[in-house]
Structures are given as C-alpha cells and as structure tokens.
Image: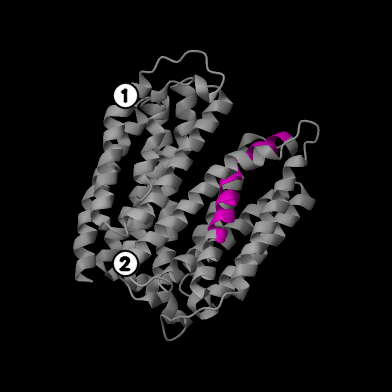
Amino acid sequence: MKKNTIKLAMYLNYFVFAILLNSVGIVILKAQKNYGVDELQASILEAYKDLPIAIVSFLIASFLPRIGYKKAMLIGLALVFVACITMYFGNSFDTAKILFATVGVSFALIKVSVYSLIGTVTENQKEHNSLMSSIEGVFMIGIALAYFLFPAFNSDSDPDAWLNVYWLLAGISMLSFGFLFFAKFENQTEIPGVNLADDFMQMFKLFTKLLTIVFVISAFLFVMIEQGIMTWLPTFNDKVLHLPENISIMMASILAITLAVGRLLAGVITKKINWIWVLSFCIVMAMLIVVFVLPRTVGLEVIEINSLSDIPLIGFAFPLVGLFIAPIYPLLNSVVLSALPNKLHSSMTGLIVVFSALGGTLGSRIIGYLFKNEGPENAFYYTLIPMLLLLISFFLLKKLTAKS
C-alpha cells in the first residue's frame, strides 16, 4: 500500500508536469495572438522554463536528502498549483513567464526526488529499470496529451476559454499532493555528506568515476537525438512533406505517442531481458529507420492533404523511430543509478538533469543548423553519428556497471 501510493504519486507528478512543460509552444502561440507580443518576445518563455530546471537541479540536488524528497515534491506541487491559478486570473504575458519559471523550479524538485526515490521502492535492477521506464512512459503520454488537451479548451467565441485548462491542471496537482501527503515512506533518506558543503561536493566527486563520465556523455547524446528530432519534426513535415501547418503539428504528436508506447513496453520487457540487449536492439532499429525509411519519406510525392487519413502510410513511418529510441533514456538513467548507493542518487540525478538540458539545447541547435545549411531533407541523417556513439557507450556502461 505504502509503495503503491508513492508510485502513484510519482506517476501523477510526472503526468501533470509533462503537460505543463510541453505546453510552452502552445502558450507561445497564444501569447502572440492574445497578448500582442512578437515571435522573438514570445520565445523567451522557453528560457523561463529550461534555465530554472538546470540551475535549480545543479544547486539543490545534493541538498534534497536533507530537506526530504517528500517535502521537496510537496513544495513543487504546491508551487505549481498556485502558478496555475495565477495564470488563470493573471491572463498576461508576464503571468506566463511566472508560470513557466515556477514550473521549471518545481520540475527540478520533482525530477530529482522521483529519480532518487525509485531506488527506495524497488528491490533490484530489473525492477528499477521497469519503474523508471514506466514513469518516463507516463511523461511522454502527458506530452502527447498536451497537443490535444489545450485545443479542447479553445473557443472561437471566447479567446480566454483556453485558460480553463489550468483549473484541470491545478486539480491534478492537488490530487497528486494528496496522495503524496498521506503516503508513508518505508525507507529513511540517506544523507550523502557530513554537512551542506560536503553534500554539494558529492556531485563533483562523482566526476572522478569513469562510470559517471561515460554516462553523462551517453545521456547528452541521447537527449541531443530526441530533442533534435522532436523539435524539428513539425518543420520537416511542413517543408519536406509539404503538409498543412495544423497537420504537421498533429503528425509531430505521433512521435510523442510512440515514445510513450516504447517506454511503457520497455518497462515490461526489461523485467525479463537484460537492458544491454534491449538498448542495442533499439538503437540498431532506430539507425535502420534513418537509413532505409527516411529516404522513402523524403521522396514521398504528397497529394492534397486535408486530414491525417490523406497521408500515405509511409508518411507515418519515420515518427516510429520514437518507438525504438524511447527506452534508451530511462534505462540509461536506471542503469547508472542502480550502480550507485541510494545516498548518491540525488547528486547523480542533478547531473542527469543538467546534462539532459544541455543535450536538448545543443541538439535542437545542431539540427536547426543542419536544416538551414544541409537542407531539411538531409538534416536527420546526421543523427546516425550520435546513435553510433551511443551504441558503443552501452557496452562501455555494461562493463563499468558490472565492476561496480
């Protein structure tokens, strides 16, 4: 009962934050239409979201065991609840900045806590792999849902009707808060250092381990691939497949759905099959899709498209790459966390979040550069380079974790 309540709170936490984090593009569009800001001004919302995640994760990850993971998550949920209500009543661009800054700070608290707690509610590496994959799968479901949830609250007659979605998100936040508040933790939180300064130094001491160095490079490479494809797939659909704008966005949601399915399936498969074979198979399949499916997609002769049903089946094939890259991130995180004592999970999660943010930012920039200079029809081929490097890193990690 206790462990199940904690797990349910984890799922709910990740679900609501996935929707909020992925809504930044939608709110950017709304800000231009409703608040009279231009594209450049609206784009600052991305920074308000991402920078707090990286900064807060780096600064407080090693301190959270002293605060307590339960308290940290309750603080994050309470902050988001207030931010959602504030967004509804504030209804301005400045309020949107406050919303995403709050979401960024809160998500840092949630992610570090959730990743650290997984080790306390699982008994072995296979259980750890499975729960990590399932939680990340729920996160991707939330991302996919955002593409449909916000439009569901739109109204042609009321430009402010979309704000009602924040009542729903505030309600989910409070539901998660309630589950978490009444959950009783069976394991005491281990303190990594003898004082606050020593806690902070634990994060840097992790860099003396070859395991940590190989892992953060692997995490960096994966997020570079995932965010590069996810960010630029709507542009690919628009400029290469020549799909209408709204269809291009809906097609991009297919990638999020396949990522969710892939992670949920990995949660089941890794209970029976060793992670190294699951990841090796997945990355090879992803490379094959880039090599053999992408050229046929690029060469697709598109007729008049008015709905998803008008798109030839091959047009749906490339987003299926998400099904195979999906298990990589949660399993990599699970593998390295399982190889470390529980008291270091918070510090390592701080590094995970920071390097994930860097990988996502750089990946999007690199693909954007390639779209401009190599052409949108060729840009995604370059993902084969980090994919190959990832395959090599899997076997290095396998060797290093075996020693650990």
Find residue 352 and report its horizontal and vertical position in percent: 40, 60
Find the residue positioned furthest to the front.
1
Q: Residue furthest bottom?
A: 194
Q: In this view, does 310 lie above or below 126?
A: above
Counting residues from the start of the chain, the first of labels 1 and 2 encountered is 2
Q: What element carries label 1?
A: helix
Write down the quadrant of residue 86 in the picture.
Answer: bottom right
Q: Can you give x and y, in whole percent of width and height, for residue 238 in the image? A: 49, 24
Going 38% across and 42% down the picture, which residue do you hit?
323
Residue 125's mark?
Answer: 2
Q: Which of marks 1 and 2 is in front?
A: 2
Q: Which mark is residue 139?
A: none
Residue 364 visible in the snapshot: no
Q: Quadrant of the C terminus?
A: bottom left
**Label 1 – label 2 distance at C-alpha:** 39 Å
Identity of the residue drawn at 52% across and 73% down: 1
Classify 58 as above or below 194. Answer: above
User: What residue is pinned by disc 1?
Assistant: 295
Task: Indicate yes or no whether the magenta region holds residue 217.
Answer: no
Name the quadrant containing residue 162.
top right
| 105 left or right, relative to 158 | left
Kind of residue sitting beneath label 1: Pro
Q: Where does the image place residue 177, in percent across and percent down from the top left?
A: 63, 67
**Amino acid type indicated by mark 2:** Gln
Q: Does the magenta stretch include residue 16?
A: yes
Q: What stretch is highlighted in magenta?
A: 12-33
Given residues 225 and 354, the one toward you in this image is 225
| Residue 210 shows up from this direction | yes
